[in-house]
Amino acid sequence: MNFVGIDMGSTCSKLVALNEAKEIVYKEVVPTGWNCVETAETLLSHLEAQGIPKDAFRSVATGYGRVSIPFADKCITEISCHGKGAVAIFDEPDFTLIDIGGQDTKVIEIKGGSVKNFYMNDKCSAGTGRFLEIMAGTLGVDLNKLCELGRQSQNHVSISSMCTVFAESEVISLIGRGTDKADIAYGIVESIANKVKSQMGRVSSDPAHLRLSGGLCEVPFLLELLSEKLGGEVKTDPLARYAGAYGAALFASELK
Amino acid sequence: MAKEYHPENPELAEILDSFKNSRELGTMAVKSAHEAGKVIIGSFCQYAPMEIINAPGFCNFSLCGLNYDPPVPLAETKLPANLCPLIKSSYGNVLGDYCPFAHYADLVVGETTCDGKKKMYEMLAEMKPMYVIHLPNNPDWERSLEAWRDELEKFRKELETRFNVTITDDDLRRTIKISNEERRQQARIYELGKFDPPAITGMQMRSVMSSVYYLIDKEEKVQKMTHMVDLLEEAWREGKGPYKPDEHPPRILISGAAIEGVKEKTLEIIEDLGGAIVCYEGCCGISNMRRPIDETKDPMTALAEKYLDVPCAVMSPNQRRYDQFRDTLDEWKIDGVISVTVHSCLPFGIESHTLGKICEEKGVPFMHLLTDYSPGDEGQMRTRIEAFMEMLH
Ligand code: SF4
Ligand code: SF4
């Protein structure tokens, strides 16, 4: 029997498959696209190709598209799944997890190995991965390049608008004024870090135990800026991108 | 999960059913009151002293807007978009003549509560006869009580001269007595949530509370409520409550304001996901129902005392609300608190922070849901509520 976790986010879908010993035997990321049900089928066919056919696994779905996965045995929210996955990945009982997702940013307080409190941004996309993408688009670069550029900034500028729409016009007027791209990029990444900082105030956290999960954990410059703003090193792990899917797979292994 | 009542209890099923369509009940009530030639007063708030309004036989109807479309988009043609949706909806309902209660109202009564409402009243006065009672901010000062008593006296005079009636102290004593009884029965409805498992669901509480509001005949109203609560208690004792006797759903306290307008995406989901809403705190919550008006005192003083005691977030400082909140956590054996507030509601939004701190102190999980009448955040609300429920398990 295998255990499968699927984290269907607004931009990317992550999958983790475990064996009986709860070791990861397969993982992948695919774009979610427009149709969640189709994405779910694609994932299913990939699993089959890996020798994990439909009747040989139990699965838990999470993420915003969790209800669109017809073959999942159970749906559990991304808060619980990220928490569970992160506890296993970081192998610690007490920490604060920051997850910058495509559509929302979550701050999750973990105590004694389980979720004790959490905060999620509301409707607005400020401070999310989507914000970074839109801003990168405005600068005509991709997300990784944006962060690289930011690191090269000599004269930091700051983007004061929290709102994506206003921030975009702020960026456009900076471009119009001939401000260096790298400086604008810095301002953009910094505004994410500031937003996360204000969200951190909603839960209790210890700057000595900060962890990052989600799609942006492979962006070193963001980690640096976050650490600087939050007053403590923000650590991550190559697996942290899969925290939600991993947690879901672990939940699947506990299903009766 | 909570179920509907057993069919073998048709009487109870019928009573609860009769409370399902509060809006229709209200529309019928206001029309027949108007046709019977009664004076109709529209009000917005727990601070509107219904005993004074009812004393000369006037009817009181709430004009609080609860819906998004059409009133909110219409209101936004005049009011700022970043204003509390309850205020926009109430105003838009009058502007578009969508609300039967406002339509028939002979006078609209407001109080100086939050800033948005005060300013909206100024604009409402262009469309409707309007009277604003001035509410002091600090409930603890002796001089607040004096000023408030004077304001209520002025309001009583206003009703007398405007409608050419006299309101005697005896009239007031009569309406005080009946409204005390009314609040006592309303408190009992919330107290059904103290049973383990609860003898009523949170959604039933809401539909009953919003429907009884429209029973104009107070004697009938008290009787109907008393009977219903008796039946619910009896059903519970026979093991036929909304939950199975051995079920112990997580007991949730709801706190906040303007909840009625967002109940589908918050309250309904909470109970759908297996939580049991056992009590409400805030504007229409338990505390207001619990404290009766002193029947031995001069009626105007007793009324002033009672209404200054409404635990609304427009008061500052608001220690009374926090104390009552703490007591409610203990008395209802609360497992989790969800504070529901709407965008741009500053008073309740800010006080949410303090409620969260009290919960932390008492080790009760707490979540603040910030939402709006406008659609679009149903999915996010559900995820948050679901995660909160998973956390309680
Ligand atoms: S919340 Fe306060 S201001 Fe609003 S209706 Fe209730 S008592 Fe009045
Ligand atoms: S919900 Fe808040 S902002 Fe809206 S009317 Fe009530 S107190 Fe005022």
Image (cartoon, grey):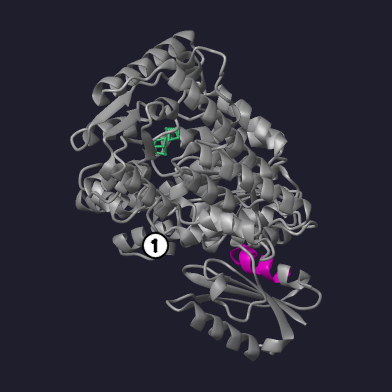
Report the residue at 33% width, 16% height from top.
B154
Q: On screen, A114 above or below B364?
A: below
Q: Quadrant of residue B51?
A: top left
Q: Residue at x 61, y 57 (%)?
A: B271
Q: Nearer the viewer, residue A46 or B137?
A: B137
> Nearest the camera: B75 or B292?
B292
Q: Amino acid at mark 1?
A: Glu
At x 78%, y 55%, the residue is B238
The image shows residue A144 at horizontal and vertical percentages of 44, 63
Circle 1 sits in a helix, a strand or a loop, which is it? helix
As drawn, the residue found furthest toward the left would be B126
Q: Position of residue B20 (x, y in %)?
A: 50, 56
Q: Which residues are magenta?
A: A238-250
Q: Residue at x 43, y 49 (%)?
A: B261
Q: Which residue is mark 1?
A: A133
**Is label 1's Cβ within 8 Å of ligand 2?**
no
State which quadrant residue B166 falls in.
top left
What is the chain identity of the residue bearing mark 1?
Answer: A
- Would you say residue A99 is visible in this rendering? no
As displayed, is residue B140 above or below residue B129?
above
Q: Is residue B311 visible?
A: yes
The residue carrying pointer 1 sits among few (fewer than 14), some (14 to 19) or many (20 or more) residues within 10 Å by Cα, namely some
Left or right? Give the position of B76 relative to A234: left
Q: Is residue B156 left or right of residue A99?
A: left
Q: How many marks?
A: 1
